[in-house]
Amino acid sequence: MNPPKNWPENFRYLPIALPDSFHEVLLEAFLGTGCEEDMKLVVPLLDEQKVYPHMEIQIIDQAFCDRHGNKHLLYDDTKEVAGHKSRGVVATKDIPAGTVLGEYGGVLSFSLPNHPELQNDSLNPYLWQLGQPEQRVYVDGFKAGNELIFINDYHDIADTNNVIAETLIHRGRRRFCYITCAPIKVGEELLVNYHPNLD
């Protein structure tokens, strides 16, 4: 599958979250609900292994700031994050509240990923976790993922987020997804809350 426009060269494009170092059967054991009725819960976008089509990755440069009317928190003419210029995701059409944007793409692992580039950082903005403390599965979008890994945290950018991170049940398995929690206008940046338990 070809990566979308403005995708960083050194990133792997993964339309969904995929395990790199363990068998899919283990994933089913950890993330499957074990409830036969849950097999009937189907999210069409997840079935197609796609993300919502009406959004676009944009590089946060001076033109991006000019279009949005102010200097973006992540705009820096020289700085690179994870080996690329900062990016954001913008709606290319109006998106209604309650729209499933897709599964957060990335590499699934049972252990906390270690990235030397982030050793001086207290936060890995590309990392989420699924499951309970006793059976964590990490979704790591640091060097592989889909458009959703470039949806930024709303803090210091907007008053509130317009996207939420939520676990959905799809065909009997938990999947980590992004969903809009407010209507988003064409040209508006999609923003999530990286710290939902702290607000």
Image (cartoon, grey):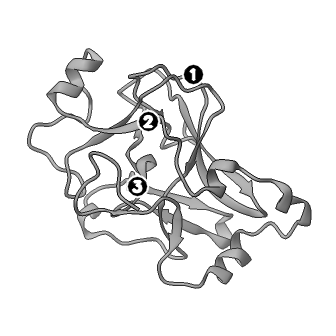
The amino acid pointed to by label 2 is Met
The amino acid pointed to by label 1 is Pro
Q: Say left or right for 98 vs 15.
A: right
Mark 1 vs mark 3: in front: 1
Q: Is residue 70 above or below residue 146?
A: above
**Percent position of residue 165, x then y:** 58, 44
In this orientation, which residue lies closer to the viewer: 172 or 94? 94
Mark 3 vs mark 2: in front: 2
Decide: few, some or many residues near mark 3? Use Cα within 10 Å; few <14, some 14-19, many ≥20.
many
Extreme residue in the right direction: 37
Residue at the image position 58 percent from the left and 69 percent from the top = 137
Q: Which residue is mark 1?
A: 183
Residue at the image position 68 percent from the left and 64 percent from the top = 132
- Element under disc 2: strand
Using the image, tell me which numbered label, if any, was put on residue 55. Answer: 2
Residue at the image position 55 percent from the left and 76 percent from the top = 110
Image quadrant in which you'd find residue 124? bottom left
Q: Say left or right for 192 vs 38.
A: left
**Percent position of residue 150, x then y:** 37, 45
- Element under disc 3: loop
The residues tagged by marks 1 and 3 sit, at their Cα atoms, a distance apart of 24 Å
Quarter of the picture holding the C terminus:
top right
